[in-house]
Amino acid sequence: MLKTLDRPDCELVEKAQEAAARAYAPYSRFAVGAAVRSKSGAIYAAANLENASSGLTICAEAAALSLANSAGDPDIDAIAVVGFSFTDGAAGASRVIAPCGSCRQLIAEAAQRANGNVRVICCNGELSCIAVSTIAELLPNAFGPENLAVSRKWPALQEELRACAERLIAIRKKQ
Ligand SMILES: [Zn+2]
């Protein structure tokens, strides 16, 4: 139940539910909204984006994580996911959904990147059933950047990326 969550988590779940309304889901007719909250407190919400070439479909969770990253605010501490079939009447919104395997992997990487665990708030469409867990519970012993020692290398690489991008932008501004 929504009432069992604290105010910030309620807001996160509500943003995920609202994002589901913007799904492009003509094939599955299953709308998913996801909202991630970064440690800064900002919320990034997105919906699933399907494609006639089924394998290209982008999950709402992946889109929301990408939004946070693109905003330069990738250290997330929670993600809410709401999903429902919009052509099955009330029954279509009664079951709790959880992130697919691919999205669990993406969330696990975001958690390692943020040096912490990420809470995952899984909801049904009407928000009457809510299951709160962590990504470590949903994907135990995840393979991730720690295995490749990326957490040590990425800060330096990120500096290199920024310096390179600044040089390119400076060249463009001189033209
Ligand atoms: Zn997914």
Image (tube, rainbow, N blue to C red):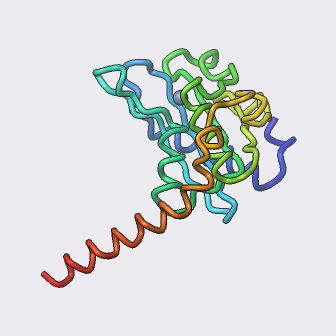
Q: Residue 9's x, y, as percent?
A: 76, 49
In the picture, which quadrant includes the C terminus?
A: bottom left
Using the rendered image of the protein, determine whether residue 134 is visible from the camera's viewpoint.
Answer: yes
* Residue found at the far left of this picture: 175
Query: Quadrant of the rendered structure where residue 32 is?
Result: top right
Question: Residue sitting at 42 percent across and 69 percent down?
Answer: 162
Camera-nearest residue between 152 and 132: 152
Q: Is residue 139 above or below residue 111?
A: above
Question: Residue sitting at 65 percent across and 43 percent down?
Answer: 146
For residue 67, side relative to residue 122 (left or right): left
Camera-nearest residue between 134 and 59: 134
Question: Residue sitting at 67 percent across and 46 percent down?
Answer: 112
Using the rendered image of the protein, determine whether residue 107 is visible from the camera's viewpoint.
Answer: no
For residue 86, side relative to residue 119 (left or right): left
How many numbered discs? 0
Camera-nearest residue between 150 and 41: 150
Q: Residue 149's x, y, as percent?
A: 61, 46
